[in-house]
């Protein structure tokens, strides 16, 4: 499935219609046994509710920015949490703490280009070329090496998006 989800941040969006479409997409994902990549913006609990109802096989909570408790709920539903540019901001204390303390099996790396640029290009266009430096930042937060982080997040991505493993 392409990116699906809920956005509680953008004003003027019809929330009820978003939920209706999101639930229909989750049902399709479950019925066709495909993973989901979820847009979750100021909608953690509502997305979790949909996941509990439809129980898709696996997926990623893209650009995760929730609490430790919410992270645990996503992980218990066979989801990984996406970490990218936002975790490079020194003022993003909660997000950086999550990146540092979550189990290594919990996370995947992402750029979200052209959005969510890292701190060093704040308010500019993000691109995949920044992922190595994002990985360095997260590895440092985890007191790990980039190689260990990269290998584990690759395995995590392949676990929750099995078609990636087939691409060798």
Image (tube, grey):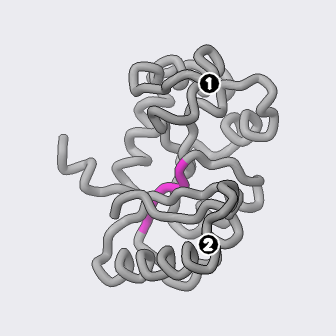
- Label 2, residues with CA under 10 Å away: few <14, some 14-19, many ≥20: few
Q: Is residue 43 above or below residue 132?
A: below
Label 2–label 1 contact, CB within 8 A: no
At a point 35% along the width and 56% down the height, the residue shown is: 161
Image vertical order of residue 128 relative to residue 61, above or below: above
Q: Which residue is mark 1?
A: 123
Question: Does dot 2 land on a helix, a strand or a loop?
Answer: loop
> SS class of the residue under badge 1?
loop
* Position of 79 relative to 117 (above/below): below
The residue at the far front in this view is 12
Question: Does any portion of residue 60 appear in the rendered image?
Answer: yes
Horizontally, residue 32 falls left or right of residue 16, namely: left
Q: Is 6 covered by the magenta stretch?
A: no
Q: Nearer the viewer, residue 164 or 31?
A: 31
Task: Name the residue located 77 percent from the left edge and 33 percent from the top edge.
Answer: 92
Quarter of the view holding residue 47: bottom right
> Closer to the N terminus: mark 2 or mark 1?
2
The quadrant of the rendering that contains the N terminus is bottom left
Instruction: State the image coordinates of residue 167 (x, y, percent, origin top left).
Output: 18, 45
Q: Is residue 145 left or right of residue 4?
A: right
User: Which is nearer the eye, 145 or 3?
Assistant: 3
Q: Residue at x 72, y 53 (%)?
A: 66
Furthest residue toward top: 120
Confirm whether residue 110 shows in the render.
no
Q: Nearer the viewer, residue 155 or 85?
A: 85
In front of the other: 57 or 25: 25
> Looking at the picture, how far across and down is residue 113, in whole percent?
45, 33
Residue 14 badge: 2
Query: Which quadrant of the view contains residue 91?
Result: top right
Stretch of the chain drawn in magenta: 58-62
Q: Main secondary structure of the magenta part?
A: strand
Which residue is pictured at 32% across the width and 69% down the height? 34
């Amino acid at each position: 499935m392409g990116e699906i989800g809920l956005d509680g941040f953008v004003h003027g969006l019809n929330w009820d219609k978003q939920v209706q479409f999101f639930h229909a997409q989750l049902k399709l994902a479950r019925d066709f046994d495909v993973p989901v990549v979820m847009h979750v913006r100021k909608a953690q609990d509502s997305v979790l509710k949909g996941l509990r109802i439809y129980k898709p096989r696996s997926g990623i909570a893209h650009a995760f920015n929730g609490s430790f408790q919410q992270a645990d709920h996503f992980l218990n539903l066979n989801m990984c949490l996406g970490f990218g540019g936002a975790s490079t901001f020194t003022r993003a204390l909660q997000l950086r703490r999550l990146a540092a303390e979550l189990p290594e099996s919990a996370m995947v790396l992402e750029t979200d280009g052209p959005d969510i640029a890292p701190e060093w290009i704040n308010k500019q266009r993000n691109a995949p070329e920044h992922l190595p430096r994002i990985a360095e930042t997260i590895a440092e937060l985890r007191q790990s090496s980039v190689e260990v982080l990269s290998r584990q997040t690759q395995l995590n991505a392949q676990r929750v998006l099995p078609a990636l493993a087939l691409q060798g």
